[in-house]
Amino acid sequence: MNRPQSAFHRITTAALTSVLMLSVGACGNSTSAGNASSGMDIKLSDIEHALTSDNDVNLTMWASSYEYLKQSVQAFEEKYPHIHIDFVNPGSQSDMMIKFQNAVTAKKGIPDILQFGYDSYPQFAVSGSLLNFKSEEIEKAWASKYSPSTWQAVHVGQGLYGLPQDQAPIAMYSRKDILQEHGLEIPKTWDEFYETGKKLHEADPSKYMGFIDVTDSKAWSTFYRQASAPLWKVENTSEISLSTDSAQARKVTAFLQKCLDDGVLKGVSNATDEFMRDINAGKYVTWIDENWRGGLIEKSYPSLAGKYTVTLPPAWGDDPQSVKTASGGSMLALSAAIPQEKAAAALAFMDWLNTSEESIEAFQNSNGFFFMASSKFQQEAAKKKTIDEFFGQDANSVYFESANKVNADWSYLPFLSQLNTYFTDVIAPALSDDGDLEDAINAFQPKVEDFAQKQGFTVNK
Amino acid sequence: MFKVHSLHHDNRKQYSKDKKQNIGIIYCLPYIVVFMLGMIIPMIYSIYLGFFQTRMIGGSTFVGLDNYIQAFSDHQLWDGFRRVLAYFVIQVPVCLMLALLAALMLDSGRIKHLAVPRILLFLPYAVPSVIAALMWGYICGQQYGLVGQMLNIFSIPSPDLLSGQIVLFVIANIATWTFMGYNMLIYYSALRVIPIELYESARVDGASELRIAWSIKIPQIKGAIVMTVVFSVIGALQLFNEPNTLKAISPETITSYYTPNMYTYNLAFAGQNINYAAAASIVIGVITMILVAIVKIAGDKWEQK
């Protein structure tokens, strides 16, 4: 019985040794994660040349909107056959973020080009995984190709990390029929929204004027963005400021509390079967969300055709003209690991994909709700007044108006998923139950501060 | 190598002894390899990772035992432990008692077409727990769920089953529904090997069927009961799928640290804090091992009574 045992010991020892050696190897590799890359020098002439040269280039791209981008990518490859795009569908945005993080850590299988939401790329920008290709030349030549708010949204601090692809301005979808039933009008300011909602809830306690989605921090923080009451600011790639307790922010918090207390708004998850049925039944009379929601409402609730009206979201203050909106959308970024000789070709491809007429046309053919960030699209499409049958109005012109009124003075913290975790842990309960929102936000800020400091950020208050 | 043609008795004895030992190792090898790759190496790697801290800005640094010390004083981790222990106290007795009752009924010999109820009771175990949680999530919906609609018929206001403390009972209910059949099968197979002579002599002595169940059947399957309790301790401490699935429906109720495993998952994949998540996992593992040892020792004592 002794020999097998000692053999087992030998195997164990061998395995342990190899583990230790692996570990030492891992230790030696894991030191370069933190330095934010200070950009390659890519000249505009190189980028232009990349399209006309006959050097073969292979680029790998990961994009979650795979289906919608496919046609445009194909059109590019037909036009410029020497640039080959290995186009991969990485799954959902959060799946892609985990895969990308893993690839960066392993230093293996890193794609060249990635599609991110404007709110989800900053964490990779500050950790140095994305390329900052800012140069005066590029800023000068390309800034005007995109709407100002999206161009601002591809910057973190002083760095330029991508090219805007689409834009998703918010709009308010209101059940006009229910409001009319109660002799109420679609509100134009938040004060009117509150008054209308109060009357509605008193007349029919089962109905709410609107809801705040509690699955992540987006809907909640949009209130503050609209009110020009920033909750935080990214100063540069290693410094952030937190201001959830500023005088303006507290005003918004108090307003939300009043709305929650009086049955005007209700905190609820918009990702459940229950919620879908509630919308069908008209429990929540308004839905404020990014414009693609209009397409989803049309698809999911065909029986509600003609009952919804699309308007701008309400304005803070008394003047409806002063309304400020918010916008989401996505951009294309370059991995910091891309070799210098490929970077120019990659940028040329990204530029073509996001702004060329052929590409925009392919986008629109595959999904009419793709609201491009390119100023060319914005100007042309704005001229076309089309009546949307479901809404019985020109919904597009509302979206354009909203896009023009986006509050660009807003930045996304470079740790969105952790921020959302704190949101659902601390703030969501106060939104959906009878909690105190101000207390919750006071408990929320120190958590964010602590996390940011532990990640190496300088935090101002 | 073993010489097949050798007929010499002494030689043969010696060879076959050697062969036995070598073959044994080869038989074990697939298990050892998978166990090393799947358990031991990741565990050692986790322990190693726990000694470091990786920042978004500043990279990775060695921090010694900091992460482990932090984990021991992390109230969110202990909050998760308290919750799974409460869950254990609610769910395990109910689940195991129902399973035992079902096994005794199947074993009573009074059920016709035995295979039908047996497979029906076992069927929920074949449903993946994520699907089960989604399904029960629908059933428990306040307004349009099965529970809500049934209460609405009688004009009783339906409670929000996915809020506050009640959701823990919902999770316990899902787990009971899933695992009752599994535990029942273990009890049932243990009951099948009890010698029939024991029942016969009891009947001769005038014992009722209930008395036989209480005084012969249950004491005879004590070993199986201890085993299911040990499995249940591990299952409770590793609770993840059900609450994590229900979190999508009720994000405001189920926190990111609702159970210890959810906490480490969210630390690693939402907070990018792989190092601390690794340290916390090791702490959870050690505590689980201690609890399992306590249950096993207590169970063995009870078994030998």
Image: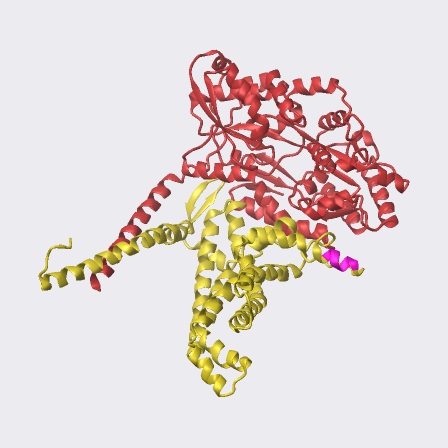
Chain colours: A red, B yellow
Q: x%, y% of residue A36? A: 48, 33
x and y percentages locating residue A263 in the rendered image? 80, 49
Magenta: main secondary structure: helix
Q: Quadrant of the C terminus of chain A?
A: top right
Measured as percent of width and height from the top left, residue A166 is found at 63, 27
Q: Is residue B102 above or below residue A458?
A: below
In the rendered view, does B114 fall on the left or right side of B19?
right
Compared to residue B9, the image places residue A339 above or below, namely above
Give the vertical position of B290 relative to B264 (above or below).
below
Q: Is residue A189 visible?
A: yes
Q: Residue at the spot x=48%, y=33% of the render?
A: A129
Q: Specify the farthest residue to the left.
A: B8
Residue A92 is covered by the magenta coloring: no
Query: Where, quadrant-wise, is the N terminus of chain A in this rendering?
Result: bottom left
Question: Residue A278, how many percent across, how many down?
Answer: 75, 46
Q: How many marks?
A: 0
Q: Is residue A438 visible?
A: no
Q: Is residue B252 left or right of residue A2?
A: right
In the displayed image of the protein, which residue is found farthest to the right? Answer: A183
B132 or A21, which is in the foreground? B132
Instruction: Report the side of B203 relative to A370 (left or right).
Output: left
Residue A320 higher or lower than A212, as above or below: above
Magenta stretch in the rendered image:
B148-153
**Residue A4 relative to residue A216: left or right:** left
Foreground pick, A229 / B140: B140
